[in-house]
Structures are given as C-alpha cells and as structure tokens.
Image: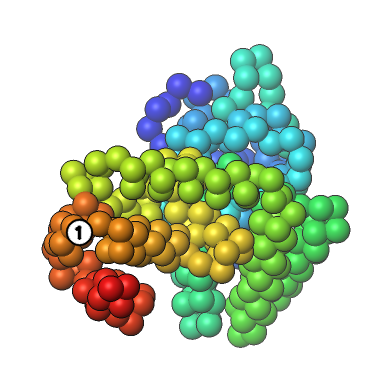
Amino acid sequence: MTNQQPYHIKSISEFHRLRKLPGPAHPLVSVVRFDDMRELTEGHPASWVLDFYAIALKRNFNAKLKYGRQVYDFDEGIMTFMAPGQKIGIEVAPDEQLEHSGWLLIFHPDFLWHTPLAKTIRQYEYFDYAVNEALFLSEQEESVITGIMQNIRQEYTMSIDQLTQHIIAGQLEILLNYAQRFYQRQFTTRKIGSHDILARLENLLTDLFQSESLSKNGQPSVPDIARALNVSPNYLSGLLKNLTGKSTQHHLHEVIIGKAKEKLTGTSMSVSEIAYELGFEYPQSFSKMFKANTNLSPLEFRQSFN
C-alpha cells in the first residue's frame, strides 16, 4: 500500500466496487459482512475519505486502524463511528493478510432527507470520537447491534416502497440510541481509565494556572485541552458529563471562577490585573463571566469579604 493520498469515496456503489462486493441493493444504504470483502491488494489505497456515514462492528481484526494520526489495535469486539469527510486507513503488517469479521453499515446523508434523523443525528457526539475512543461491546450488546443491522439489511432487500426509508431510518435511530446507552455504560464501567483522564485534566489545569501561560497565551480552548489529553473534544465532554454532570467548558469556567475568588479575597490585585492573569483579553469579559456564575460582580464579591 504505497499510495499516500487518501482515496475519496463518494458513493455507496463506489465503495462496493472498491471492495469487490456485488452492487448495492439500495443506492444510499448498505449493510455488508467484512468476511465478504476481498483481501486488500498491493497498490490499494491506504486511507479513505468517505462522503457517507460508516458504522463498523469488527471482530478478529489483525490490522491497525488509523483514524487521523491515531492508531488503534483491535483485540476484541468493537464499534467505530465515522461521519462524512473523516479520514480512515488500515495498516497490515508485512507478509500478513487482512483478517476480520463483523458488520459494516454505511448510509449516505441523502438517505436521511425528510426524516427526523436528518437533524437529530448531529446530537450523537461519538461520530467525532477517535478510534482509540471506540465502543467496546459485551456479547449481549454485540448481539443487539448485529440484530438491528440485519433488520436494516432485510428491509432494503425486500420490495422498496414509500415506507422503506422511514422504517430503516427508525432502525438507524434505535441503533444510535443503543450505542449512546452503551457508551454511557463504558464511561461508568471503565472508571479507572475515566478517572485517569479526569486526574490528568486537573493536573493540566493546575499547571496552567500556576504558570504564566494564561497571561501570555490566553485561556486554552476545549480542543486545546482535549489535544493535550490525547482524546477528542466530544469524548472529553461526554466523559466529564457522565462523571461530573458538567461539560469541559463548564468545568474550565468553574476552575477560573475558583482561582478568581482566591485572588479577589487573598490579594490586593485589581480586577483588571486578575482578569489579565487569568487569560482574559478584556476585563469586561472576566467581570461578565464572573457575575454570570456568582450573581455578583468581582468587586461586589470582594466587598462581601471585607
């Protein structure tokens, strides 16, 4: 696989041709077994950019999957979710053949036209998670997802009529909601890893506020924080909401307010000096955020302690 440029796959039919599969029974949605895909050959594109959604349920995967710059080794049943425009690739060790089983569900955004899912699909944040934040499934959970995928496959292979789209969209929504539930379970049951990320977040913020970084560079954005923790922004927010009930932005604001209260009550610094030290470009922005979170202006808060 020597091709360095990602291969742009625009349609479900093009994907079927590329993977040597029979033509799709429906032009905008398809469910295929990984066992039916032909072995990748020399010169095959090493990475792809898809114009459609892809939900994969993989087993016995002996290669490494690259998602952007992240690499993930599959060693158990796992689900990944890709939205249109994201890059993905596969690395197979020299002298090895790609082996994997499971199911792949792909559907074009156009399939969702005139269905409620066309708007609500944006609420499923895991389409922006990286591969190393994939969903691990129990045997029972895997059976549930496989059953839904098979239902979708059966529906579009029957005679297509005016209800086909809505029935499949309904099945898609059920699958996505189950995935949402399973991710919440994963956040809860994998507490060691989750709390490790939370501890690293606290250490990161502590280091930031103890250095001169904020006054020089301003406050970090949520993507900056997530990048420093080697997770995606949506995954970090999802994890924090599950553990603390608060988003990353809310968590950051709480830390800022806590530091501001320390400086207002423990130093003689002016409000402007505190604002600049905490990374605000304008003191007015600091005062507005402080009052929104405490119902007091910074000066009113300081006076309440005198």
Residue at image point 18% right, 58% down: 269
Q: Residues within 10 Å of mark 1 (few under 14, many from 20)?
A: few
Q: Is residue 125 above or below residue 3?
A: below
Q: Nearer the viewer, residue 191 or 57?
A: 191
Quadrant that contains the C terminus: bottom left
Q: Nearer the viewer, residue 48 or 254?
A: 254
Q: Is residue 126 left or right of residue 276?
A: right
Q: Position of residue 87 (x, y in %)?
A: 45, 43
Q: Position of residue 27 (x, y in %)?
A: 55, 63
Looking at this view, name the residue that lies furthest to the right: 140
Task: Report the number of numbered marks.
Answer: 1
Quarter occupied by residue 18: top right
Q: Position of residue 198 (x, y in %)?
A: 55, 50
* Residue highlighted by disc 1: 268
Q: Position of residue 172 (x, y in %)?
A: 64, 70
Q: Is residue 44 above or below residue 257?
A: above
Residue at image point 61% right, 61% down: 243
Q: Is residue 156 left or right of residue 199?
A: right
Q: Is residue 49 visible?
A: no
Quarter occupied by residue 296: bottom left
Residue at image point 49% right, 83% down: 114
Q: Is residue 246 visible?
A: yes
Residue at image point 47% right, 77% down: 119
Looking at this view, name the residue that lies furthest to the front: 306
Residue type highlighted by circle 1: Ser
Element at label 1 = loop
